[in-house]
Amino acid sequence: MAFKWVDVLDIAIELDELYPDVDPMQISFPDLYQKVLDLEGFDDDPSHCGEKILEAIQMAWIEEKD
């Protein structure tokens, strides 16, 4: 699957599966950004990401943990 920045929920699900021991409430935005860029199938312009997108991914990941 190809991921774009707008695929917030799909990205969160993938991160939760790949990093089950990471607490999304504690991850820094630079670390989260890098983890998203490292996802297999991530195919979007890295410069199209901002704090609001990272915040949305983080919130969705937190929801996945519950």
Image: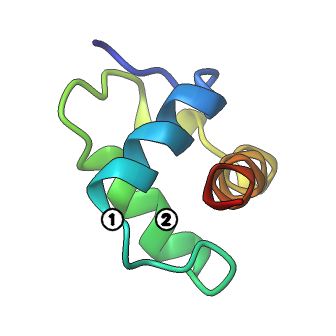
Residue at x-position 31% and y-position 21%: 43
Residue at x-position 64% and y-position 49%: 64
Horizontal relation, residue 31 to residue 60: left or right? left
Residue at x-position 72% and y-position 46%: 60
**Circle on res. 50:** none
Horizontal relation, residue 21 to residue 40: left or right? right
For label 1, the residue is: 19
- In space, the residues marked 2 and 1 are separated at their CA atoms by 11 Å
Residue at x-position 22% and y-position 24%: 41
**Circle on res. 32:** 2
List the single residue furthest toward the top. 1
Residue 25 place in picture, x, y as percent: 69, 79
Three-letter code, disc 1: Tyr
Q: Compared to 11, does 50 lie above or below?
A: below
Residue 23 place in picture, x, y as percent: 55, 80
Residue 44 place in picture, x, y as percent: 40, 23
Give the mark, 2 or 1, whose residue is nearer the N terminus: 1
Q: Secondary structure at mark 2?
A: helix
Of residue 21 and residue 53, the one placed in the foreground of this image is 21
